[in-house]
Amino acid sequence: MQDTAAAPSPSEAERRILAGDLTAAAALLPDPAAPEAADPAWARLRLFLSLTGVLPGDAAARNAAARAAVPAAGRPPPDLPALASALPAGDGLQPMVEAERRLTLASAAQAEALLRQGEAQAARDLLEQTLASLTPSGPVFRLFGRANAELGRPSDAVFAFERAVDLAPGDRATRIDLATALPSVGDCEGAARMLAADAVGPEEAAAFSARLHAMARAEPDPAAIAAETRRYRAAAAARTVPPAPRAPLSGVPHVGFFWWQEQRAAGYWMTDLLRHRTPGRLRTTLYGIGLTRRFEGSDLARGADRVVVCNRAAPDAIARRMRDDGVDLLVSFIGHDQPDLLAVLDQRPARVHVEWLETGWPSGHPAVSHLLADRGHCPPDIGRSMDIRIVGFPTPAMSGGPALAAADAAGRERRAEQGFVYGWCGPASAIGERTMAVWARILREHPAARLRLLHEDWRIGTARERVATRLMELGIEGRRVDFDSPERLDGQTALWSRIDLGLDSFPTGDIATTFDALAMGVPLVTIGGPRHAGRHAAVALATLGMGDLVAADEDQYVAKALQAAARPGAVAELRRRIPDLLRASPLAGGPLQAQSFETAVELLLGIRRGA
């Protein structure tokens, strides 16, 4: 039997090129008229070899061949950096520039298609290769930013968007991409400024949600946020379906909780409600986003009657599932930091929709009729400014019970070290310019003290750099500020064992961070702000009889922080007492809070009559 030689392959030609034998590689190319010549792999190689000048024919013929090969190439070859290094200079420069431009466009088009297909890693790999071997362009850097954002690489995303803006400063869409990425590295103030400067309005739904999210973190004036939220509410009303007629309610009410796992304070509150609920009074389903294995063994997972994992589900599919499940009342914890998920509410999947103020400001979605809050915590005019009703619980509508359990398990012993340590274990996005300026004042007044910032956000290099750089500009040496992050988010509570006195952020605080500190026995200095998001620590401290740690303004905040450091014995005594005070207070949760919620559900569904 006669042996038949195998047909040459593109990979074999690439190996010849990388070995420096361009002539041998050119000999392997199929005839341009052959069917296999249309294979994108062969087309890419013909393009490259045309540009190197090894193919037969005069310069004009080779340039024509190069231009003809580009559209078929589709995207750069796998080893483009090595191949591109062999491109000659000289007479062939103009066709090379044109071919490179087309290659860049082809690469960008391929990457955009991969992103649409959900292949963010493949898109990132392709774009990284393109940026390494071709002249950078704004569109490629913008796509590189989008791929990194989808992969949860916020520092890389912000860097890419910044380079895209540098290369195309007049491109409004690129500026908006950068602004919407800034909160992921903690810079909500920068995001709010950029989005306001570009006059982002509610017709740009995702970008406007990013603006509202940034304002909820950084804007001190409630009236300014209320005005923008009303604009969102009016625009969202046009795409929200009208209430559908439903059969009369019968049987045990079905309550759905729509929750993202990173919302720790909402997790604390739900865990306590479900642990102390009255048997048979409600049915509960938790619709979870971003659920991980860590969630599976949690008290919250065990407390709900049913858990529906919605990690990658589309908003329409989530809404349809809620409707099919017969949810009567939906408690939404979704805010403008998850704008795509707010679209679930566009479908009105339940009879009644309410929100719990995890983010410190209502979403403003027209399907939401009530906010769950408490009378002391929620500013009295928020309902009027938002045209929404408040369900005012008699006790604080937040719970530190799970934080107490975590602290009991971790132990509260203060780690021995020299000097007084101020600290904060909340998210980077809560630390704005005003907070950093006041912290710097305290450290300048107390030169022997240190500042310790502990949170998973400090794994993000850009977030850490933003705060460290600003504190250095304010006169604080880098050696006086420690950044660290836990291996796991559920280890956040124990981090407070490395801090003597907590310095709350403002104008936005963090509920879970407040409870983590108090559960570990760490006192906090805070400012009682005009907004819900700025009152978490103030309400908690007042409830525990520690209102003397609540400052009226920034000068008082500095004075109270310095006074506490001057009395380490008093601080140590507070550390011993705080956990017991918390355990004996309404902040620890318990049956009363669960019963208040159950009663509110029955009132909202018309099962029970009352005020």
Image (spheres, rainbow, N blue to C red):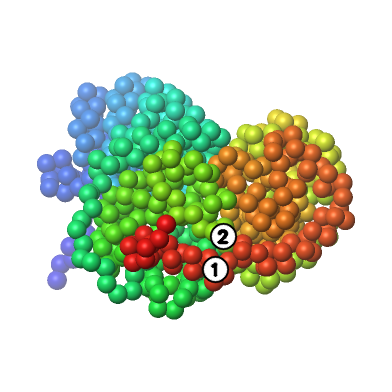
Badge 1 density bin: few <14, some 14–19, many ≥20, Cα 10 Å: some
* Circles 2, 1 touching at the beta carbon (< 8 Å): yes
**Above or below 396: residue 161:** above
Quadrant housing the N terminus: bottom left
The disc at residue 592 is 1
Quadrant housing the C terminus: bottom left
* Residue 406 visible, this orientation: no
Instruction: Tell me which residue sits at (44%, 28%) in the image.
Output: 196
Tell me which amino acid carries mark 1. Answer: Leu
Residue 292 in the image: state x and y as whole percent.
46, 65
Residue 571 in the image: state x and y as whole percent.
82, 55
Q: Nearer the viewer, residue 334 or 142?
A: 334
Q: Nearer the viewer, residue 191 or 365?
A: 365
Instruction: Tell me which residue sits at (67%, 72%) in the image.
Output: 409
Residue under label 2, please give it.
Answer: 395
Badge 2 density bin: few <14, some 14–19, many ≥20, Cα 10 Å: some
